Amino acid sequence: MMTKPTPRNENDDEKIEKMVTMTVAAAKGLAPIGQVALPLAQIARSDLAPPEARDLAKALSRILQGERDPIDLAAALSPEMAEILWDTLDQIEAPVPEPGEDNVRAEISFEELVEKVAAACTGEVMLWQQLWDFTGKLAADDRLSPDVRALGHVLRKMLAGERQKHVLDELSAEHRWAVEQLLAWLNEQAMDPGE
């Protein structure tokens, strides 16, 4: 007996948005391609994902391999998924913002930084790009205290998709409480994105 495929829901839309965000980041060199390619391959082969999400994951994987022809990439996609793919290609071609007043500022408060990381981890591509650069600078700046460098390193890992609790081990008590709450919230979102 054949079962009818389950229709896409809001959770699927959020997962598709995350696939797109991470593909754009990897294609722009802002995230390691391997960290994005593996989950895309898993989704493409999963019976748990809707067929159109699997097809999109396959097309996004091809983008990571360097393909950019919108017609070829969209050939096996539904019209809605083709639109998403074309938007993805547009985002990849858009220039990375230059440092300026619209970007993350060096004088950002700790609480604001944690809030911005939460927003970036849930799909804001441009903010993700800015924070990826910013946290990398925090982690590498020898003029900053070891606690602040560790914070930059941990937040960067979280932007790259790390969600294991051991990532908190590097943090001072001053920073750990808020980052631990952020990590718990991100893990809750991953388990039940509709909340």
Image: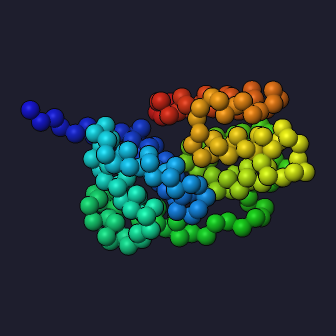
The extreme left residue here reads 1
Asked whether, in this view, residue 27 is left or right of residue 165, the answer is: left
Asked whether, in this view, residue 137 is left or right of residue 63, the answer is: right
Which residue is drawn at the image coordinates 77% and 64% (left, top)?
100
How far across and how far down the image is residue 74, in percent?
32, 64
Which residue is drawn at the image coordinates 74% and 60% (left, top)?
102
Q: Is residue 182 visible?
A: no
Asked whether, in this view, residue 179 is left or right of residue 29, the answer is: right
Observer-nearest of 152 and 82: 152
Observer-nearest of 26 and 130: 26
Which residue is drawn at the image coordinates 12% and 36% (left, top)?
2
- Is residue 139 shown above or below 177? below
Work out which quarter of the rendered image holds the N terminus and state it. Answer: top left
How far across and how far down the image is residue 68, in percent?
42, 71
Asked whether, in this view, residue 93 is left or right of residue 108, the answer is: left
Which residue is drawn at the image coordinates 65% and 30% (left, top)?
166
Observer-nearest of 26 and 89: 26
Residue 188 image-quadrant placement: top right
